[in-house]
Amino acid sequence: MIGAGTVARIGAVVVNDAVAGYTTYTDLTEETAMRRTLVRFDWQLSPRVARVRKRMSRAEAILWNELKGRKLLGCKFERHCPIDRYVVDFYCERLAVAIEVDAMMQDDPHALRYDHERNVRLRLCGVVVLCFNDDEVIYNLDGVLAKIRQSIRYLPAR
């Protein structure tokens, strides 16, 4: 489950994955280890974050309007937040939840592979990833917000 180059002693002191670039301190189980992961900020993403923030899609703007200002269950979401080597659309640090809004690219195998790898890697960092497509956000915003509420309602705070 943990990447190559791993030194793992679950139930002891530390899980260290030099390849992925993160360290997890644990005392119980592998599941607990994943929750306590320290997410490393990649400073090389700063210029990319600035570019992405200037170009929000219509669906992202609609969802951001509902997430900003702690409107959703009092959770503070950040917009275009860098986590590991990715920039997620919205992120709540307290709950370790990332929300991704993507255009439907079912015909593009590269985009599907990228999304899958991103989601797996973020989950390894202890982040819960919720994915929605643009049309879902634009035409069924209430349903999207209900799914987000349902998903985050019982998550433990970090």
Image (tube, rainbow, N blue to C red):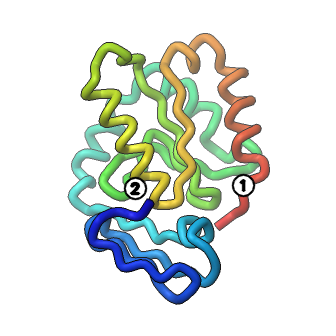
Q: Position of residue 82 (x, y in %)?
A: 37, 53
Image height of 145 relative to 155, above or below: above
Q: Is residue 85 left or right of residue 74?
A: left
Q: Nearer the viewer, residue 117 or 45?
A: 117
Label 1 crowd bin: few (<14), some (14–19), many (20+), radius 10 Å: few
The image quadrant that residue 140 belongs to is top right
- Of the residues shown, which amino acid type is indicated by label 2? Ile
Assign a secondary structure to mark 1: loop
Q: Is residue 33 above or below residue 59?
A: below
For label 2, the SS is strand
- Image coords of residue 59 (percent x, y): 50, 21
Q: Quadrant of residue 56?
A: top left
User: Which disc is residue 83 wearing?
Assistant: 2
Report the front residue among 155 and 4.
Answer: 4
Dot 1 or dot 2: first in sequence order is: 2
Q: Position of residue 67 (x, y in %)?
A: 62, 38
For the C terminus, the quadrant is bottom right
Q: Where, quadrant-wise, is the N terminus in this rendering?
A: bottom left
**Residue sitting at x 71%, y 21%:** 143
- Residue 155: which disc? 1
Give percent across and percent down for residue 93: 56, 58
Neighbours of disc 2 within 10 Å: few (<14), some (14-19), many (20+): some
Q: Residue at x 34, y 48 (%)?
A: 86
Q: Residue at x 29, y 45 (%)?
A: 50
Task: Name which residue type carries label 1.
Answer: Leu
Front position among marks 1 and 2: 1
Q: Residue at x 32, y 13 (%)?
A: 107
